[in-house]
Image: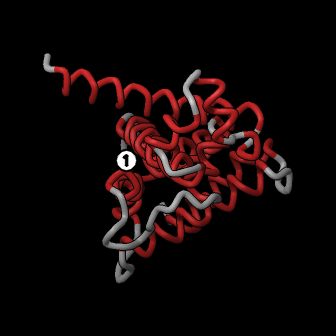
């Protein structure tokens, strides 16, 4: 291994450490607790080293969002691959989405609530975000219905899931009613 390869590997390792530490801190104490000073202390590197990887908190949030999008896409695909038929697939997708949002609140916020400097629904949209949408579209596109654009249907269903996730987390919807909400969403919106 050349010196350059070793330095690149070390740099990538530091970036992973910064992102993992930011996620951990955000999940424990919220995104307000994630500061470059606090991150530098936790990872035991100076702030200039941290800034050599990320220009600031916004880029760190973006990196967490991209990592979260890849994880969510994998979770959605794992859940839907085990389901047989459109209704079980859409139901599994809805539960996997809501479980991901509930189990990773800081990551979910980085993905959809906070400014991570990422473009959505644009040609510049990073691949992990496109893939997360594709994971939704794979199951929802087949139930969009006649004359309904699959991408548009997926956006509406996703918006409904996002609303359920954020309202439940905010205490506006009781969590014990998640199952009937999902059933209603699948039956009435997806019509399967």
**Residue 125 appears left or right of 170:** left
- The picture places residue 114, in percent across and down from the top left corner, at 63, 58
Q: Quadrant of the N terminus?
A: top left
| Nearest to the observer: residue 139 or residue 88 | 139
Decide: is 59 above or below 67.
Answer: below
- The picture places residue 100, in percent across and down from the top left corner, at 58, 40
The answer to which image quadrant residue 30 occupies is top right
Describe the element under mark 1 as helix, strand or loop.
Answer: loop
- What residue sits right under mark 1 in the picture? 85
Residue at the left extreme, as displayed: 1
Q: Tag 1: Cα neighbours inside 10 Å, few (<14), some, or many (≥20)?
A: few
| Nearest to the observer: residue 161 or residue 117 | 117
Residue at 37 percent of width and 50 percent of height: 128
Decide: is 5 above or below 139.
Answer: above
- The picture places residue 17, in percent across and down from the top left corner, at 49, 27
Residue at 37 percent of width and 73 percent of height: 122
Residue at the bottom extreme, as displayed: 147
């Amino acid at each position: 291994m050349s010196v350059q390869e070793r330095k690149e590997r070390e740099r990538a390792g530091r970036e992973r450490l910064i992102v993992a530490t930011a996620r951990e801190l955000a999940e424990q104490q919220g995104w307000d607790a994630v500061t470059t000073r606090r991150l530098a202390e936790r990872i035991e590197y100076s702030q200039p080293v941290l800034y050599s990887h990320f220009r600031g908190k916004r880029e760190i949030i973006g990196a967490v969002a991209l990592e979260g999008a890849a994880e969510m896409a994998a979770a959605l695909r794992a859940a839907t691959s085990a389901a047989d038929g459109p209704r079980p697939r859409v139901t599994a997708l809805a539960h996997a989405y809501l479980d991901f949002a509930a189990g990773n609140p800081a990551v979910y916020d980085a993905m959809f609530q906070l400014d991570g400097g990422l473009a959505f629904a644009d040609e510049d949209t990073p691949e992990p975000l496109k893939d997360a949408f594709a994971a939704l579209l794979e199951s929802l596109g087949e139930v969009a219905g006649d004359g309904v654009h699959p991408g548009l249907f997926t956006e509406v269903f996703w918006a409904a899931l996002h609303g359920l996730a954020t309202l439940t987390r905010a205490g506006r919807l009781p969590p014990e009613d998640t199952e009937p909400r999902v059933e209603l969403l699948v039956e009435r919106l997806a019509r399967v």
